[in-house]
Amino acid sequence: ATTGTADGFGNHSTTWAERDWPVHAYVEGAATIEQVGDNRADLSVIAYTVYAPATDPPGEYDEVRVAGRWYPVDGRPKDYSHGPWVAPFAGVVVELRRVDG
């Protein structure tokens, strides 16, 4: 998502666009079923962990397509490329989580 200029009321517009994002790997997390409240509604939680280079990762408000389906980013991506020693393999870890039901 890209934040645009402010309108006459001071609200910033958000622009969404698809782009390619190279990744090293992704791992499917636990697909769980949660029961919520007394009504016993079942929610299916699907999670992925994505490992990628630190160049231009998605933000916490973005969505990522994995295996043909869109998943929102769960929290801020963890960036492991900032340290006292240069590590060319260091990158980001992005958690994805979608709830159906």
Image (cartoon, helix red, strand yellow):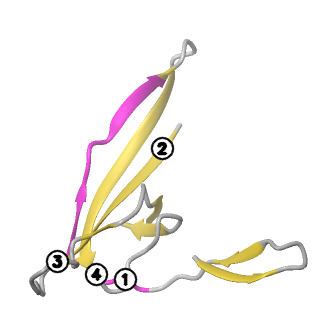
Residue 33, above or below 62: above
Provide residue 17's location: percent of width, then percent of height.
Answer: 58, 82
Query: Could you tell me how far apart the alpha carbons at marks 3 and 2 are, in whole angstroms?
Result: 35 Å
Q: Secondary structure at mark 1?
A: loop
Quarter-of-image position of residue 1: bottom right
Residue type beneath disc 2: Val
Q: Are marks 3 and 2 in contact (CB under 8 Å)?
A: no
Q: CA distance from mark 3 to mark 1?
A: 23 Å
**Is-magenta flag for residue 28?**
yes
Residue depicted at x 51% and y 17%? 40
Which residue in the structure is indicated by mark 3? 83
Q: Which residue is mark 4?
A: 54
- The residue carrying mark 2 is 99
Kind of residue indicated by mark 4: Ala
Query: As rendered, which of 12 and 94 lies closer to the eye?
Result: 12
Name the mark on residue 21: 1
> Nearer the N terminus, badge 3 or badge 2?
3
Cα–Cα span, label 4 and label 2: 27 Å
* Rendered position, 21 above or below 44: below
Q: Under tag 4, what secondary structure?
A: loop
Q: Which is more foreground, mark 4 or mark 2? A: 4
